[in-house]
Amino acid sequence: MSTAIQTGNGPLPRQIPYIIANEAAERFSFYGMRNILTPFLISTLLLFIPLEDRAGEAKHVFHTFVIGVYFFPLLGGWLADRWFGKYNTIFWLSLVYVAGHACLALFEHNVTGFYFGLFLIALGAGGIKPLVAAFVGDQFDHTNKNRAKLVYDAFYWSINFGSFFASLLMPLFLREYGPSVAFGIPGLLMALAALIFWMGNKKYVHVPPAAPSPDSLTRVARTALLAKAPGQGRPGLVVAVVGVAGAVVSLAMSFSWGFVIAACTALVLLLAFGGIGTAMQLDRARGHHPDEAVEGVRAVLRILVVFALVTPFWSLFDQKASTWIVQANDMTSPMLNLFGWEFQVLPAQMQAVNPLLVMLLIPFNNFVVYPLLFKLGIIPTALRRMTAGIALTAVSWLVIGWIQVSMDAGTPMSILWQLAPYALLTMGEVLVSATGLEFAYSQAPRSMKGAIMSFWTLAVTVGNLWVLIVNASVKNDMVLGHIGDTGLSVAAFQMFFFAGFALVTAVLFGMYAMKYKMVDNYRSEA
């Protein structure tokens, strides 16, 4: 056996290009429709809503859609891990995805048909999202596991390659050719993505779904919560029951909060209180289940704490396609000249800055920043990178808040001022999101790869839930009165609130990261 293979630096799997190409086309399709969704809603679909309420409703629809996209990974992970395997689940949900794009193109003036298309895309895109990343990890073993980081970075680079061209071109197609063409082109790209993925079928490593286990996470957790200990109560069970009661109360508030906020809050309460309660009594499962299964649950609970602390990052990041576009609509856009081509930047096109910078920053970090840090004796571990990323994201919102304050004071601001916060946000994204994919796969027990990746994407759902809650709260007269006392506009206040939210989280994340012990859960067999 060669030294490279012994050290985990063996050759790259030959099937990886199919997955990378599939991801690039799929991400073009997703970001192509996602990045024009808010301006389309404001300018076309929501014309029946009063003008002053249209932007707020568009943001609500957008973040509800994003919540759906990142909720359905739970379904996709379960289907793949327990029934159909990753490949079959990805392929068939990709076809659902294509059907959703078709609905957007066909029902541009029909609210019901358009929203049904958004539901199908949320189901398809969400269902396959964690599985593709986990499917990448399945192609590696201990002979080439060190190549995985390079491939995950290439994987993330391909996402942004597709996103860049989608962000640049789709706003133009929407303006010049209308919604049918602008939403139809992403549908064609998604069909191409499904075809490319199918072409590599015979070359992939297919890890079969795990058989139902008597020592699964849910069964170990149930045993831990229900088991009695001599002379002791069951405080963990009490905590879990409090979570169930809170979830019931949350669902009962659907009429006043709205179903999406109520349902997502109920899910968060169940996971949070159930996880805490299980951790309090986990050792009671020993003897009923193998120590390996108990420790596996402990590992999952530790991972979920990391995921929970990442949710504020997503609440800031995803608003670049809603709050930042709404701000850009009120900014001036100068004529630019690029190699003799004069053009004016559209508000939605500013999002192209994000994937362009990602494609530049990933290789820059790998070949310049990280080697330099190693030479300085600083090891850029996954959790350290994620801590720094959350903090940088907070700083980007301090800058966007300053821009909003200047605009509120009557100062005309060029749309190019958003370049600075986009750069900071993107640096944060590279450190959090790309790293999170690698972290989630490496830390997940083998039988729960798809499910853990689903929990990683569920963090995005919770992040967007915070946005919906904050947006709903500023409609309260008492809250508006407190905001008025600060002298800030509602928009500026929310921007600084989210910045502070992320800064506090970065501190908590860094503290937890110092105590977290990394594990290695790549396949042992070649």
Image (tube, grey):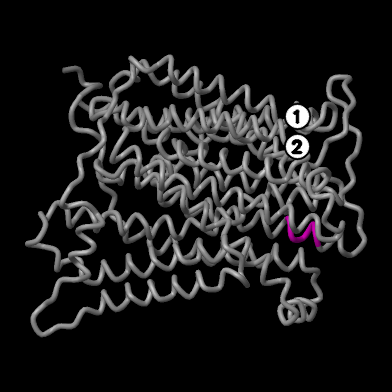
Q: From which residue to which does the magenta span run?
A: 400-404
Q: Is residue 409 above or below residue 370?
A: below
The percent position of residue 333, horizontal first and vertical second, equals 88, 41
Q: Secondary structure at mark 2?
A: loop
The residue under label 2 is which amino acid type?
Glu
Q: Residue at x 51, y 37 (%)?
A: 124
Please rate how many residues cluster around mark 1, counting C-alpha atoms within 10 Å: few if below 14, some from 14 to 19, many from 20.
Answer: some
Q: Is residue 234 above or below residue 125?
A: below
The percent position of residue 477, horizontal first and vertical second, equals 75, 79
Please identify the quarter of the rendering in which residue 49 is found.
bottom right
Q: Residue 114 or 172: which is nearer the viewer?
A: 114
Q: Is residue 479 left or right of residue 235?
A: right
Please identify the quarter of the rendering in which residue 287 is found.
bottom left
Q: The C terminus is located in which quarter?
A: top left
Residue 33 among those drawn in magenta? no
User: Residue 108 bears which disc, if any?
Assistant: 2
The reply to whether residue 375 is visible in this rendering is no
Q: Is residue 44 left or right of residue 247?
A: right
The percent position of residue 38, horizontal first and vertical second, equals 74, 46
Please rate how many residues cluster around mark 2, counting C-alpha atoms within 10 Å: few if below 14, some from 14 to 19, many from 20.
Answer: some
Q: Is residue 520 left or right of residue 36?
A: left
Label 1 or label 2, whichever comes before in sequence order: 2
The percent position of residue 101, horizontal first and vertical second, equals 63, 32
